[in-house]
Image (cartoon, rainbow, N blue to C red):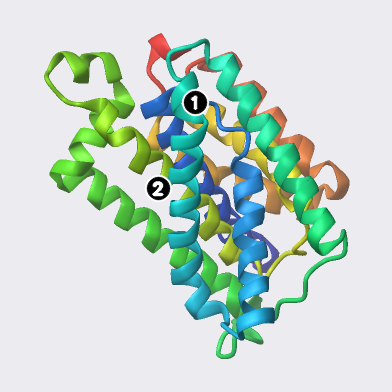
Amino acid sequence: MSQFLQYTLQGLAAGGFYALAALGLAVIFGVLGVVNFSHGACYMLGAMASALLLKNLHLGFWPALVIVPVLMFVFGVVIERLFVQWLLKLDPLYNFLLTFGLTLFTVDLMKRLYGVSSQPYEVPAGLRGRLSLGSVDLSTYQLFAAGFSLLVCAAVWLVLTKTRVGMIVRASTEDAERSRALGINVARWVTPVFGFGIALAGLSGVLAAPYRAIDADMGSNFVIILFAIVVIGGLGSILGAVVAGFLVGLVEAYGQGYYGQISQVLIFVLMALVVLVRPSGLFGREESA
C-alpha cells in the first residue's frame, strides 16, 4: 500500500509537467489549429534557460520560475509573427512541418552552443531532502512540483472559466468558426494565445530542471508523450489535456514501479484503448474525431 501511495504521488508530480505543457499544446491547437511539434523543444528551452540563468547570472530557481515563462511568451509571440501566421490559412500540415523544422533547428543549435552533456542544476534550497509520511518516503521537491502544477492549472482554469478573456479564448478553442460568426475577433487572440501556450511549455521546463537531466534532447521523447496526452484528453480540449496529463503521469509512475521497462509502452496502450472506445478522446467533441 505504501508503494502504491508513493507511486501515486510520484505520478502526480510527473503529471504536473505533462499537464502544464499539454495545456499549452491544447490551447494552441484549439485556437490556431496548429499541431505544434516544437512544444517539446520549448519545454527543453525552458529548462535550458533556467540552467543558463543560474550559470551566467546567478539567478536561481525562484527568479527563473517568473523570468523564463515571460521570455518564452516573447519567444512564442516572435515565432507566431515571423512564421506561423503566414501558414494558418493553408493545410495544417504546413505548420506541422514548420514546427518540426523549428524543433530540429533549436535542438541542433543548443547542441552546438552547449554540447550534448547535461547542464548542472540543483534542487532549490528549502526543497531539498525527503519527507516521510508514515511508511511513504517522498522527495520534497516532487511534492512541491505536484502542488505548484495543480495551482497553476487551477489558476489557468479559473481565468478561462471566470473571466471575459477566458470565455473568448475558450469559445475560440471549442469552436473558432462559430465564435467568428458571433462577432468575436478570433485573430486578435491568436498571437497572445500562441505565446501563452509556449510560456506554459517553458514553465514546465523550469519545474523539470531540478528533477531531470537538462540537455538538448530532453524534449524529444517528451513531445511524443504530449501528443499521446492530447489524443487521450481530446483534441483541443483544455480540461482533457489537464486530466490526461495527470493520468499519464500516474500510468508512467505505476509502470516504472511495477513493470519496469515497459512503462512508456503503457502510455500508448492507454492511448490506443481510449481511441478504440472513444475516438474523440475522454473530453473531446465527437466531431473532432
Q: Which amino acid does label 1 sit on?
A: Val
Disc 1 or 2, which lies upstream in sequence? 1
For the N terminus, the quadrant is bottom right
- Determine whether 101 is above or below 252 in the image: above
* Residue under the point 70% across and 46% down: 106
Identify the image quadrant of residue 133.
bottom right
The residue labelled by disc 1 is 34
Please state which of residues 36 and 139 is positioned toward the viewer in this rendering.
36
Dot label at residue 196: 2
- Residue 232 in the figure: left or right of residue 218: left
Inspect the image, locate mark 2, and give the three-letter code of the amino acid beneath it: Phe
How far from the left and from the top, in percent, is residue 188? 25, 33
Q: Toward which corner of the image does residue 229 lie, by quadrant?
A: top right
Note whether residue 130 is visible.
Answer: yes
**Residue 93: horizontal and vertical position, in percent?**
59, 15
Circle 2 sits in a helix, a strand or a loop, which is it? helix
Outermost residue, front side? 82
